[in-house]
Structure formats: C-alpha cells, structure tokens
Image (tube, rainbow, N blue to C red):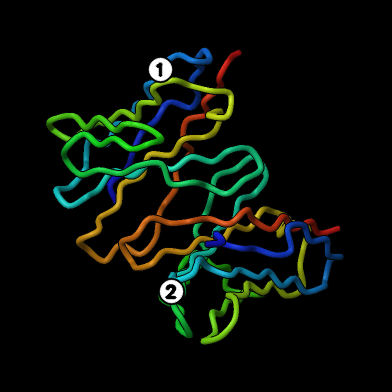
C-alpha cells in the first residue's frame, strides 16, 4: 500500500485557517486521497476525499498537487471543536482494497 | 437515521472472562469493520465482514478473538479469556459498499482488571 507522511502535530489559532499537509510520493494512479479525523474519546469521522481535482464540502477543502504527490486539507476557520487527530489515507478503490489503514496522523491543537 | 451503534460503551471484565462487543451498522450498510486502539496508539484494523461472511481477518489475533455478522442482528466481536493487554477502545465502522466512506461508532472501551 502507498504510504502517507504527515507532521505529528500542528497548532492553530481559533477562527484562523488551518492547512494540514500530507505527502504521498508513491501514490498510484488509482489511489484516492481520503481524510478522516478523530476527536477526543470518539470514533473517527470522514472528512473529505478526492482523486485529482480540488474538492470542497461543508467541513473542509482538499487541495491536491498537480503531480498528486502531496495534498493539503484546509479548514477555513478553525474552531475549538476542530481539535482532533487528522488522518490522511490512500485508498485504491479500483483494486482489491479491503479496509482503511490508519497511520499516526496529525494532532491539531486549536488555541483560543 | 441512527449512526453506527456500539454497545456497551464501557465494559469491565476480570482476567479470564469473556467480552462480547456489539455493533449495529447504519441502515443500508452491509459492510462492517472492527478496529482496536490501544492506549496512546493508533487505530489497527482487525476484521472486515459482510453479512454471514468474514472477508478479511488479517488483523485479528489468532487465538481468543472471533467475529461474526449474522444474517439478522448486530455484528459481534468476542474475546475469550481476556488478559490485561486486551484493554483498549474497540471501534466498529460500516459502509454501504466496498468503496464507500466509513461511518464509525463511538467505540467500546474495554478494561480488564
């Protein structure tokens, strides 16, 4: 499975944008980029996913580099409730992908 | 439309007892996944099931652990003869198909004393 690399931790101020990076230099053509987050004492939660084009939804935006070797999850206006571990995961949905494989993620701290 | 329901939320077992963890997937979801999260560690895949079938159990310990997803009723993760090292949060997720996004439950926190 293609691997992702994320910073262990990041800090942001409340009500400011947050850019969470993810490197995936060995991504294959059929790998989708998925983001999940895990709030304290809760199960993970789907955030967003994309293949080549940038994606927006009510929670966040996903910016994908032209060569697809990196991507950035953008929270437009961080709130205290966004403090969580953010996981960047590659999923080959065209192959025999069976399950999500979680790495160590980025611990986001939001400062008031 | 209720999400993924896991129960109990907290479970305390003495060493050597059995633990049964239940997971009801979202309505319309026929794919169920179990993950374990040890204290201060990441989420580790355990098993993937569809109705009445185990699709992938590559993450399950070979002994004492079993899982099922019967035609009727919730998916069950069963741990026999629990040991202290089984203390962890166990999360269940479901998806509508193999490619769909996962919806996770709130987990069962197992403590073995």
Q: Could you say which quadrant of the image residue B70 lies in?
A: bottom right
Q: Distance between the residues labelled 2 and 1?
A: 37 Å
Residue at (64, 63) in percent of width and height:
B6
Badges 2 and 1, same chain: no
**Rendered position, B8 above or below B53:** above
Quadrant position of the C terminus of chain A in the picture: top right
Residue A88 placed where, x, y %?
38, 39
Q: Which secondary structure, mark 1?
A: loop
Residue B38 placed where, x, y %?
64, 49
Chain identifier of the residue bearing label 2 in the image: B
Q: Which mark is residue B9?
A: none
**Rendered position, B29 above or below A52:** below
Chain identifier of the residue bearing label 1 in the image: A
Residue at (43, 43) in percent of width and height:
A36
**Rendered position, A16 above or below B3:** above
Residue at (66, 43) in percent of width and height:
A41
Give the side of residue B63 with respect to residue A74, left or right. right
For mark 2, what is the residue? B30
Q: Could you say which quadrant of the image residue A42 lies in?
A: top right
Label 1: few (<14), some or many (≥20) within 10 Å? some
| CB within 8 Å, label 2 to label 1 | no
Residue at (29, 31) in percent of width and height:
A23
Give the side of residue A106 with respect to residue B22, left or right. left
**Rendered position, A58 above or below A83:** below
Label 2: few (<14), some or many (≥20) within 10 Å? some
Residue A60 placed where, x, y %?
37, 32
Give the side of residue B24 with respect to residue A30, left or right. right
For mark 1, what is the residue? A17
């Amino acid at each position: 499975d293609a691997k992702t690399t994320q910073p262990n931790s990041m800090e942001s101020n409340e009500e400011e944008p947050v850019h969470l990076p993810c490197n995936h230099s060995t991504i294959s053509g059929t790998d989708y980029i998925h983001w999940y987050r895990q709030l304290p004492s809760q199960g993970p939660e789907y955030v967003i996913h994309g293949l080549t084009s940038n994606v927006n939804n009510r929670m966040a935006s996903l910016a994908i580099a032209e060569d697809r070797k990196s991507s950035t999850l953008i929270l437009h206006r961080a709130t205290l409730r966004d403090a969580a571990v953010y996981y960047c995961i590659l999923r080959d949905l065209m192959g025999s992908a069976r399950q999500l494989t979680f790495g160590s993620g980025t611990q986001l701290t939001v400062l008031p | 439309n209720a999400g993924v329901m896991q129960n109990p939320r907290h479970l305390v077992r003495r060493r050597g007892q059995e633990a049964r963890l239940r997971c009801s997937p979202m309505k319309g979801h026929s794919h169920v996944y179990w993950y374990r999260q040890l204290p201060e560690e990441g989420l580790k895949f355990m098993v993937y099931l569809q109705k009445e079938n185990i699709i992938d159990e590559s993450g399950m310990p070979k002994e004492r652990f079993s899982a099922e997803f019967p035609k009727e009723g919730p998916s069950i993760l069963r741990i026999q003869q629990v040991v202290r090292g089984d203390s962890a949060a166990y999360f269940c997720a479901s998806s509508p198909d193999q490619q769909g996004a996962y919806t996770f439950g709130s987990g069962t926190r197992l403590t073995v004393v």
